[in-house]
Amino acid sequence: MASSSSGLFTGKSTSSKLKSVKLLEVLNALEEEESGHSREEIFIAPPKNAAGDFTDEDSGDEDGQRGTHVPSNVLHAFVVPEDSGTREEEEEDLQLQPAMKKQKAVVEPQRVWTKRDIRPDFSSWTATDPHMEDLKSQELSPVGLFELFFDEGTINFIVNETNRYARQKNVNLGLTAQELKCVLGILILSGYISYPRRRMFWETSPDSHHHLVADAIRRDRFELIFSYLHFADNNELDESDRFAKVRPLIVRMNYNFQKHAPLEEFYSFGESMCEYFGYRGSKQLPAGKPVRLGYKIWCGTTSRGYLVWFEPSQGTLFTKPDRGLDLGGSMVVKFVDALQTRGCLPYHIFFDKVFTSVKLMSILRKKGVKATGTVREYRTERCPLKDPKELKKMKRGSFDYKVDESEEIIVCRWHDSSVVNICSNAVGIEPVGLTSHHSGANKMQTQVHQPSLLRLYQEKVGGVGRMDQNIAKYKVKIRGMKWYSSFIGYVIDAALNNAWQLHRICCHDAQVDLLAFRRYVACVYLESNADTSSQGRRSRRLETESRFDMIGHWIIHQDKRTRCALCHSQTNTRCEKCQKGVHAKCFRAYHIR
């Protein structure tokens, strides 16, 4: 992105003129900003011509080798100021996209606002979830839950597309489903055991050698498979879709996520970021200047963080808003349409001011869907509430509200530490509750009034944040040369998060935390592949999934000494069930998590 045609743009509040700059100049400019300014977010879109073969290898790998530059026409970044809640700043954001066409203003009928509480006419939630009861009865292991999403059909699809792509490059890869699971196991393992270079997993040096990886697959074989990993037929790509290279995987994952999603009343919708790790990847700025570089993902989740539906953002150039909404509102409607494939139930969706508008609330109400979200003042369609400056002069907990007479949509302005605008088509003011507030002057907790819709919003809106938190803890660290390699890691992490969420619902007696859950899946995939390792290796019979069941494990003598599975020194005893060499002193520790 060294040339002016790189597609990297920035804008300033003092001028609407766009300036094409280098990425380094943008980062330096962000570092020089005053601490009082809003934080910045760098958004990267995939190549415009995603169907081109060159986009299969356009980025540096994890080692950051010299010479692996990103072509200037591959990545298009937009530096977008974080929302500050004003219409002028959002209009400035729109100017950052040079090809965006101005839409003609649509004259909406003026709404009549009245000072009263809302009278919603939605039916109450009475739905049951027989599918979840069926999953509970199956008592699936962590691997079984993960394979609800990366099921046999998805694995075979990836195997076929990868072999097809290798043949197009005149390479006889011969990838099998078992080998692909082994590769997935290494990617999962890299989330909690990472090295500066992935080849260190196979080094014989005692400070880096990882026997589980080295025994499962040879280094060169892993590198070959990983370099040809593919998810679509290059001859059948949709040139209008920037994510055409991974679109079949997105479709399959969305189908599986929705198929096994818990059927709940409350859902969250928001933005997630998939970090991009190319040669010119994310740059860490000093404290107070966070910059996130990567792909923006629209996400719909349950209130606990199960990802139900996702769609990578391509901007308004490739995704046309409809129904008179902006792009964010259109994505909310698409998520609701996906939810209603399971039945037109009275779902309740929560989102923030990036998406909320009175127009969106009206559309969702007509679909029979409840919605609540914070809202910017200019999107309230001239709702005559008390001026924010006047409300700030009143005591904390004060609020004002109005209801649209025709469609029963309420807009409330509440004063706490700041003034918050919130809109809903389903929840009103009553009952007014109390919430604790820390008073800096008195250094004590005080009670302030809080309307009902504020309280419910704060309880249910954090689903996307919880999912992001889970993914960030142990996200896949290994990345490749392809621009979408980090996105594939994001999909794997999301599937593991969903599988763990189902584990928490289905297994009340033997729950494990997220780290133990990921370790279990990685170990099973890696140890299972060691059974069918290449000629010249010792064949092993492993039953990892029964290792921790505490049933039928006996220590017996063996004639030939082997390495202990726990301490790796020589032993002449083994577990009869696991068929693994184990010392008597290591026997208990080996079979306990």
Image (cartoon, rainbow, N blue to C red):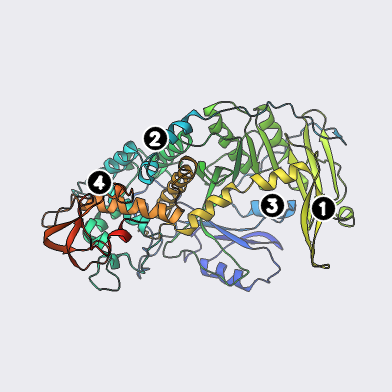
- Which type of secondary structure does the marked residue at label 2 adopt? helix
Give x and y (percent) for residue 512. 44, 51
Tell me which amino acid carries mark 3.
Glu
Q: Is residue 20 left or right of residue 518?
A: right
Among the two numbered marks 1 and 3 on one chain, the one whose residue lies closer to the N terminus:
3
Real-space CA distance between mark 1 and mark 3, rounded to the nearest whole angstrom: 32 Å
Image depth: mark 3 or mark 4 in front: 4
Tell me which amino acid carries mark 4.
Gln
Image depth: mark 1 or mark 3 in front: 1
Image depth: mark 3 or mark 2 in front: 2
Within-10-Å neighbours for mark 3: few <14, some 14–19, many 20+: some
Residue ID for mark 1: 448
Among the two numbered marks 4 and 1 on one chain, the one whose residue lies closer to the N terminus:
4
Q: Which mark is residue 138?
A: 2
Q: Splitting the image into 4 quarters, where does residue 557 fall?
A: bottom left
Among the two numbered marks 3 and 2 on one chain, the one whose residue lies closer to the N terminus:
3
Tell me which amino acid carries mark 2.
Gln
Among the two numbered marks 3 and 4 on one chain, the one whose residue lies closer to the N terminus:
3
Of residue 254 and residue 380, the one placed in the foreground of this image is: 254
Give x and y (percent) for residue 75. 46, 56
Real-space CA distance between mark 2 and mark 1, rounded to the nearest whole angstrom: 47 Å
